[in-house]
Image: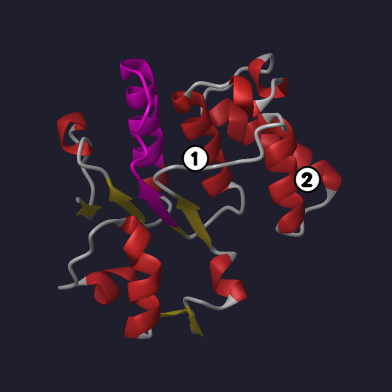
Amino acid sequence: WWNEALHGVAFNGVATVFPQALDLGVTFNPRPVGHVATKNRIGYLPENPYFYDYLSAEELLVYFAHLHGHSTVDANRRASALLDRVGITPERRRQQLRKYSKGMVQRVGIAQALLNDPEVIFLDEPMSGLDPIGRHHVRDLILKLRERGPVLIACPTCGRLQFDMDTVVAD
């Protein structure tokens, strides 16, 4: 659906995809994009994620997993696995987010976008604030995610990373 919905539509960035998709009447098996059940099947990383900075990364992801309806055991398991996947060590994941660099917060944002095991992922500036090693790690993660389903990216710097993507939405 995403390819048909976005074909020929010029976006200024991923932040405009949802409103424009709603205006286009895009459906997602068979519900409208704005439907709660549909939103539960989509992962989204905003350009500047903002989280409760008094929480740790682990606490934040467990909180969001509970919002998605996961049990405490499953929420803890998902949080741990995703933080491993985005490269946040067990020692760091227990620190308050206010002590994280922009790149570390970005990694937590990516983990948050993957928490509900989405079918489609929208990433707005996923490389923002990452150092070169972090960019390489996130690039590899995105390429693996692409094997599971569509990943739509707004990222003016991604071209330098030689993405082999179906769709790159650039500002």
Residue 127 shown in magenta: yes
* Residue 116 picture location, percent across and down: 61, 54
Q: Mark 1 falls on what kind of element?
A: helix
Q: Nearer the viewer, residue 27 or 130?
A: 130
Looking at numbered disc 1 in the image, what kind of residue is underneath it?
Ile
Q: Is residue 57 above or below residue 33?
A: above
Residues at circles 1 and 2 in contact by the CB criterion of under 8 Å: no
Q: Mark 2 falls on what kind of element?
A: helix
Which residues fall within the magenta stretch? 121-144
Q: Residue at x 39, y 31 (%)?
A: 138
Tell whether 58 sits left or right of 1: right
Residue 105 shown in magenta: no
The residue indicated by pointer 1 is 110
Q: Which of the two discs, 1 and 2, labels the residue nearer the N terminus?
A: 2
* Residue 80 picture location, percent across and down: 69, 31
Q: Residue furthest right?
A: 72
Tell whether 104 sits left or right of 130: right
Residue 74: image tag: 2
Q: Is residue 36 above or below residue 98?
A: below
Q: Nearer the viewer, residue 8 or 96?
A: 96
Image quarter of the N terminus: bottom left
Q: Residue at x 69, y 20 (%)?
A: 95
Tell whether 148 sits left or right of 72: left
Q: Residue at x 35, y 82 (%)?
A: 23
Looking at numbered disc 2 in the image, what kind of residue is underneath it?
Asp
Q: Quadrant of residue 62?
A: top right
Q: Nearer the viewer, residue 137 or 112?
A: 112
Q: CA distance from mark 1 to mark 2?
A: 19 Å
